[in-house]
Image (cartoon, rainbow, N blue to C red):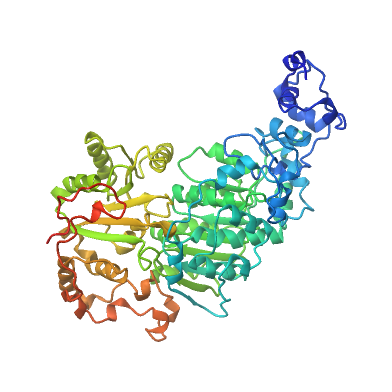
Amino acid sequence: MSHVAVENVHGLDQQLAVLDLNSADVQGVPGICLSPGRYIPPHLRNKEASKNGFGYDNKDAGGWNAPKDTAYNNFGGRSDRGKSSFFSDRGSSSRGRLELSEAVLFGRYERGGFGGGGNSRWVEDSRDDEDWSKPLPPNERVEHELFSGSNTGINFEKYDDIPVEATGQNCPPHIESFHDVDLGEIIMGNITLSRYTRPTPVQKYAIPIIKSKRDLMACAQTGSGKTAAFLLPVLSQIYTEGPGEALQAMKNSAQVENGKYGRRKQYPISLILAPTRELALQIYEEARKVAYRSHVRPCVVYGGADIGQQIRDLERGCHLLVATPGRLVDMMERGKIGLDYCNYLVLDEADRMLDMGFEPQIRRIVEQDTMPPKGLRRTMMFSATFPKEIQILARDFLEEYIFLAVGRVGSTSENITQKVVWVEENDKRSFLLDLLNATGKESLTLVFVETKKGADSLEDFLYREGYSCTSIHGDRSQRDREEALHQFRSGRCPILVATAVAARGLDISNVKHVINFDLPSDIEEYVHRIGRTGRVGNLGLATSFFNDKNSNITKDLLDILVEAKQEVPSWLESLAYEHQHKSSSRGRSKRFSGGFGARDYRQTSSSTSSGGFGSRGGRNTGGHGGNRGFGGGGFGNFYSSDGYGGNYSQVDWWGN
């Protein structure tokens, strides 16, 4: 195309010129005129395209695979990998440029997407008869964005030793490979792109249970692959079954105003509830990976962010919705979300949601609206702990469910090295500086405190001492929290001071060290905190500052250290022995043997030794007298070895 022609091209013509499309490429498309000098005002462009009969005929036009911040481009251009049809069609499209229909749709209309106006119906109207089980053409730019950072850890094989127990009627057999169950072409292709070699223990059991359309309550430690355990089978079912009546309901919900279609109510097929904004965003990012090259469009809504932007994103289409309870109720009351056709409900970190006071919102969503009742929908609940009280409450949401208990990953597999040191309250900051020097400034370190004020104060202290650090807690704005997490993940601020808001479900890879500057008041929170390191097979270290204020968790903390085959200081054994005698009349411990975070309360009437779930409280406590050989001293050089950096060994951390 000549220099003069390029100089005079405007609007759509300019985009086509940049893509180096000659006139022969567009002659067969009615209504497009590439004559130099023609200009279409932006506010008339949608009308112009609609008048000329352009619909979203291309399968990619739905925008399910759109990059987060950029328009679609760079489709095709990769040769056949020779694996399956999921990969073999990569070389079929033209190299280095878009076809015209893609140029029109992605170059011109990407900004509008599905949002507002009559043109939002183009995509959905063209999808009524399409096979949702067939993969769409690849988008290399999106593929690189989604799958370039996968990391499964160096000790993945140790998952084979994790104990798993499933209770309930007619439990389907577990799988050993992703190929043992029909997940479909799209899922298997995305598993390959994610570089998953084999399922983790929770995935081995949860995937066939969900594929068998059974309700599930799964107790598995954070970092064990729970998110993929429900995303893979749920989306596999959606691909197989298609949108059903949800698609037609969305189209029927359009309001005609001034002769134009208004914005439509969305009817997600699957709903995933999470307690925090960070966890919701994390699940959404994983859902984008599993939904790559499919018709399914994931969305996420959460509090603390611009609701207008979230509404506009919803209006582009929503088949799988990740949400925090409060913001979802708001969207439902605004008439933006309908749950009439929600066939799959997932409650992630379910115990924490109920424990944090979300029960009214959850009941409003599940029981007091239009969601199909239990029995007609499939319900899954996942968490690292499920106390009996929470299990009893969860009966209202589940029907004939299977209870799945997976041993604590990182404890029984010894991926997390746990250390407990006695530190008086006034000495904590000094000890923390010594510890940070010992572990090296390059390692990602997560420091937990109990209060928001304490987080800000400790961040200021570390900053004054010359450490690059940031903090996250409930009073920080959503933008500040996201920026803090980004700086921490990228390594620009390798120290993150956090309250419990960051302890639940956050998947921050390569965290080498978790420090409990303030120990939590309950042992379940401790389990969640140390789960931030040693994730999915990686090695990690957890250090906890202990003093008289933490005596209430002495026994449970000792039990966890013993179960995980960690070295226990003798002073902790002595304290636990004393505490055991003082509290023996108050009931048995909340922890359970076998490395499980809970047991199926329905099994309490059976033998206490069944399935290895016997109560920790009933065991002989004579072993706490120190005969395991745990003693003081000898730990001074721990932080100068095993890849944790530094040659710092002056402090005898574990002396008694």
Horizontal side of residue 552 vs 394, given as left or right: left
Q: Against 151, is 110 above or below?
A: above
Please state which of residues 369 and 117 is positioned toward the viewer in this rendering.
117
Instruction: Give the residue furthest to the top.
Output: 4
Instruction: Give the residue furthest to the bottom.
Output: 607
Where residue 251 appears, as percent x and y from the top left, is 73, 47
The image quadrant of residue 133 is bottom right
Question: Which residue is depicted at the point 27% across and 81% down?
Answer: 619
Horizontal side of residue 557 vs 593, given as left or right: left
Where residue 277 appears, as percent x and y from the top left, is 45, 47
Quadrant showing the C terminus? bottom left
Quadrant showing the N terminus? top right
Please state which of residues 39 and 491 is positioned toward the viewer in this rendering.
491
Please state which of residues 107 and 44 is positioned toward the viewer in this rendering.
107
Horizontal side of residue 635 vs 207, given as left or right: left
Can residue 591 be seen from the camera position used here?
yes
Where residue 457 appears, as percent x and y from the top left, is 24, 40
Question: Which residue is depicted at the point 32% across and 49% down?
Answer: 499
Horizontal side of residue 83 vs 310, given as left or right: right
Circle count:
0
Where residue 538 appears, as percent x and y from the top left, is 40, 57
Question: Which residue is depicted at the point 80% across and 26% down?
Answer: 22
The image quadrant of residue 476 is top left
